[in-house]
Amino acid sequence: MVFDLDMLHRFYDDYPKRIARIREVMKRPLTLAEKILYAHLYDLSSITEYRRGMDYADFRPDRVAMQDATAQMALLQFMNAGRCETAVPATVHCDHLIKASEGAAADLAAACSVNAEVYDFLKSVAACYGIGFWKPGAGIIHQVVLENYAFPGGMMVGTDSHTPNAGGLGMAAIGVGGADAVDVMASMPWELKVPRLIGVRLTGKLSGWASPKDVILKLSGMLTVKGATNAIVEYFGDGVSTLSCTGRATICNMGAEIGATTSLFPYDMADRRYLIATGRSEVAALADSVAEDLCADQAVIADPARYYDMVIDIDLSTLTPYANGPFSPDVATPVNEMREKVTLHNYPDRIEVVLLGSCTNSSYQDLLRAAAVLEAGLNAGLNIKTELVINPGSECIRATAERDGLLAVFRRAGAVIMSNACGPCIGQWKRKTDNPTRRNTIITTFNRNFAKRADGNPNTYAFITSPETAIGYAFTGSLSEHPACDASLDFLSPKVYTDLPPQGFAVYDSGYLAPIDGAPQPVIRADSERLQRLTPFAAWNGNDLNGLRLLIKTKGKCTTDHISMAGPWLKYRGHLDKISNNLLMGAVNAFTNETNIVKNVLTGKMDAVSTVARAYRDAGIGSIVIAEDNYGEGSSREHAAMEPRYLGVKVILAKSFSRIHETNLKKQGMLALTFKSPADYDLIREGDIFDVACAAISPETDIEVLIHHSDGTSHRIKVCHTYNAQQIGWFRAGAALNS
């Protein structure tokens, strides 16, 4: 089945005209990112040479994708937008709320029982507003999108930070918060800071243990978690044609970990083969008709330094397997250097569990390569020395892997086959352990490895690898030993490079439900523990924000996992009041080095962050959060912005922000400010009171903050912001959806 075929025909019929108009205005060679971005301007007559990383522009994406955890809040907001149906094709995918515990059948049944109210709500909203619905067990959102919806040259927004996965098929797919998705579904202009462009030239060809995952693991180490913030990473070069479509998707997926707005590969024969294999021959033919503009112009390729803001070279022929971690996806270490790292940093050497799956690595090729390594070892008489957990990416992948005997190989090794869902990657892992706080090491094929993320244990050292490298580690059971570094185990080196099943993908029940004409409005029970209708936030009164109490000064990395934890809290993603009880509970208090304990200046006692925030709010006192670099790194979850807004926090003052989270704060009517001098972070003391002179806020002007210390002294500092006129309007209205 080809979805939205009429829309695709309109898009490809119009695309050459749009590109011609862009060339007429720009009068220079174009990168692929520029072609796709400019072709999706909300008003094509507004084309101009935007300043990358500085100017904002309005866009008109082609579609929206939402996963079940974030879809709840997005759709609750959409229900207040006053529309009868979505303006663009949209889908909901039930993949985040399924726990990984006993195995696929038992876990799926349990999820459908425990989450029945949420699933019924999402299904009813989808039916009512013309949204496609993918049932629990159908697969992980990004794999399902790649198999069914992604198309070369298109633009999509998704309420998940790994939406850029679709860039493997040449689509500008961008992770956003729910309010942004509502803009697109309501046919409103969608605003984005025009990204910088980072060109990555790939040469050579992968061999041995090296895989597409190692490209992004290496690049993460080069750029760090914020090196591509407000940038598009565009891949080009002779090495591109040697990579499969799903391998490219893996690279684009994890581009979120370097802060990239999205990542892109050019359209070529690998993408064409994938479209045909997934039943979209007609889409392949349409893309073929405009293929010359689904890649960067040849002049760009010939002299990339003139057209990209940064150019990075990676020789695939010299690439070796990596293991990134622990606790941050940019701590990149070649496997052959890991023994030294284990000794230097005293990492727990014994590997307890190897986990394969997640939206990053659960394609047919991923499972095939991993199974090939596993079968070679088993046939040679080797034993697996770790637990082994498998999460297929979709029902399409699971059914095909079952038919082709891949899952039988995993079962032979004692693996547990979990549901086609995110599972452990999003903290939905009911891990069986005799000590939930023990220092231990796990190997995953995921994209993130923040502390506590997989199993809630702050002492779990998680390392990110490719599937084949992960299986190699399963045979050694030791972080400091890997077959890639042992000539006697060379026979394990993966030699299978097939990217598509030779017999085609298996016939299966996709789990898709189409919207229903005339479906009734969704109903939310007044006493629901899982869902809560939204009340619009109050508008700003126009005055300076004086007398703000310090809620918490966070220390070090403060991701969305720290601000609004996933795992067991996912069940409250549709209930703002209840989920707000997890506000900043994972953030480290800079004054105590503890988590979820801050001083309530009204009582003089220490209490949970959310409890203190509620106390200040209920007393009519606003509060402020102080943070370090890349605040809000990680997920697109807008709960991390809505919770502080709901609990009376007025300002987040940080050294810097991640792109998605800064936008989410703006959308929810918060002030996201940065220290003009990062050293001013050190001035903040426990018990400080803040006056923020924001009454006259205007674009590109600093704001003055007066800090009152408890000893009677004070400091006056300058802070910066990136609000444009429209975003200041959101702030004045109390939220973007109020304006």
Image (cartoon, grey):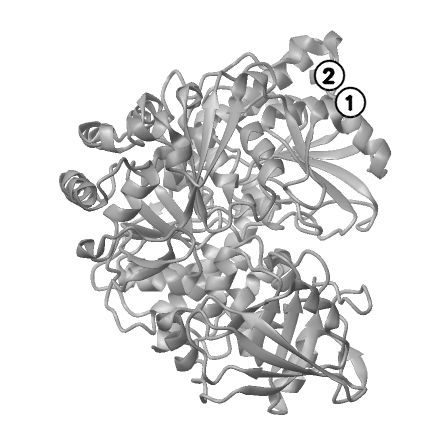
Provide residue 466's location: percent of width, then percent of height: 59, 29
Please say if 71 is above or below 613. above
Residue at the image point whose x is 60% and y is 60% from the top: 631
Q: Does the rendering let one see residue 578?
A: no
Q: Position of residue 611 (x, y in %)?
A: 69, 79
Q: Which residue occupies the foreground of this view, 311 or 147?
A: 311
Disc 1 marks which amino acid?
Answer: Glu
Residue bearing the label numbered 2: 485
Q: Quadrant of the N terminus?
A: top left
The residue closer to the viewer here, 646 or 424, is 646
Q: Write down the residue under mark 1.
A: 481
Bin the neighbour count of mark 2 within 10 Å (Cα to Cα): few under 14, some 14-19, many 20 and up. Answer: few
Tell me how far mark 2 sits from mark 1, CA to CA.
7 Å
Q: Secondary structure at mark 2?
A: helix
On the image, the x and y values in percent for residue 359 come to: 50, 40
Q: Quadrant of residue 218?
A: top right
- For badge 2, the amino acid type reads Cys
> Which residue: 32% across, 60% down?
190
Residue at 46 percent across and 69 percent down: it is: 666
- Residue 440 lies, with reference to residue 91, above or below; the image says above
Q: Residue furthest bottom?
A: 619
Toward which corner of the image does residue 635 lie, by quadrant? bottom right
CB within 8 Å, label 2 to label 1: yes
What is the crowding at mark 1: few (fewer than 14 residues within 10 Å), some, or many (at least 20)? Answer: many
Q: Residue at x 29, y 50 (%)?
A: 49
Horizontally, residue 508 falls left or right of residue 251, namely: left
Quadrant of the rendering where the C terminus is positioned: bottom left
Q: For numbered disc 1, what is the local secondary structure?
A: loop
- Classify residue 499 as left or right of residue 227: left
Closer to the camera in the image, 220 or 603 = 220
Q: Position of residue 132 (x, y in %)?
A: 31, 51
